Image (cartoon, helix red, strand yellow):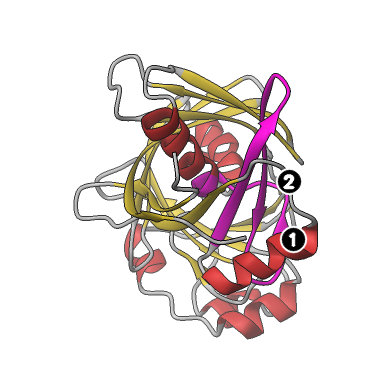
Amino acid sequence: MDENYFHVDAFIGKGLRGNPAGVLLLKQPLDSAQMQAIANELSLPETSFVWDDGDMQAIRWFTPTREVDLCGHATLAAAHVLLNVVNPSQKDIRFRSASGELYVKRDIADGERLILDFPSRPPQKIAEPARLATLLGAQLLEVWQATAIMVVLANEEQVKTLQPDIAALIDYVGCGVIVTAPGDEVDFVSRYFSLDRSEDPVTGSAHCTLMPYWTARLGRHVLHAKQISSRGGELFCELKGDRTLLGGYAHIFLRGKINL
């Protein structure tokens, strides 16, 4: 196969465009500076770099400005390419990553849907930071924290209409911010404001924090979620022990070759 680069929209849904990710298939790993330069050149929310690493695939993820330790949509994008273009007869794949071994499989009931097996990141309830409500422009019901701060609002409309100064918000809290509420047509909705001082279209890793919270609140382990950014995304989630399973669909938008 001469192609080594794919632009994939991940966690798409009906009328939802998902989150774009680059997937670069490597014959051997590049150094970190090279991967960062390529991610910067592509200027997508994240780019996955994937190569054979013994008994599984190695994967690393870079935004245009930094490496991240876990990325759901770019993992879904990489798995979509490997399971639909590189090895279409294969049913599952394992990645070696900075967050440990990650497993992706085809949904038995729906072969187009892939399911990511990620580590959960349960949040702990914290006192509301003094300026957080003002910076978000909303009345906060609860504030929790794992790797990101998670803010709970009363309803979907409040989440949808938020218009924070994202740079000021991130500078104040010093980490990503998840905002969530019960959904009108799904179990819960969310938005995510990232350390890159922008809104992420769909954030798989944020659902590793959202799922422990919503499972405890709703009393169910299988939940349907939407991220209601301007592009929008859909996730089919399950909490299984200390793992979060994230199901979603992806679509290859562009494919070709990057000259390295």
The spot of residue 153 in percent (x, y) is: 47, 60
The residue that disc 1 covers is 127
Q: Within the magenta stretch, is there residue 240?
A: no
Dot 1 falls on a residue whose secondary structure is loop
Measured along the vertical axis of the image, is residue 193 above or below residue 247?
below
Position of 116 relative to 136 (above/below): above
Percent coordinates x, y for residue 82 in the rendering? 47, 33
Q: From what the image shows, is residue 4 above or below residue 174?
A: above
Which residue extends farthest left?
A: 15
- The question of residue 60 being in magenta is answered with yes
**Which region of the structure is painted magenta?**
46-74
Residue at screen point 56% across, 59% down:
46
Check disc 2 and give the amino acid type: Pro
In percent of the image, x 30 and y 22: which residue is there? 111
Disc 2 target residue: 29
Q: Disc 1 residue type? A: Ala
Residue 93 picture quarter: top right
Q: Viewer-proximal residue, 174 or 70?
A: 70
x, y (%) of residue 49?
A: 62, 48
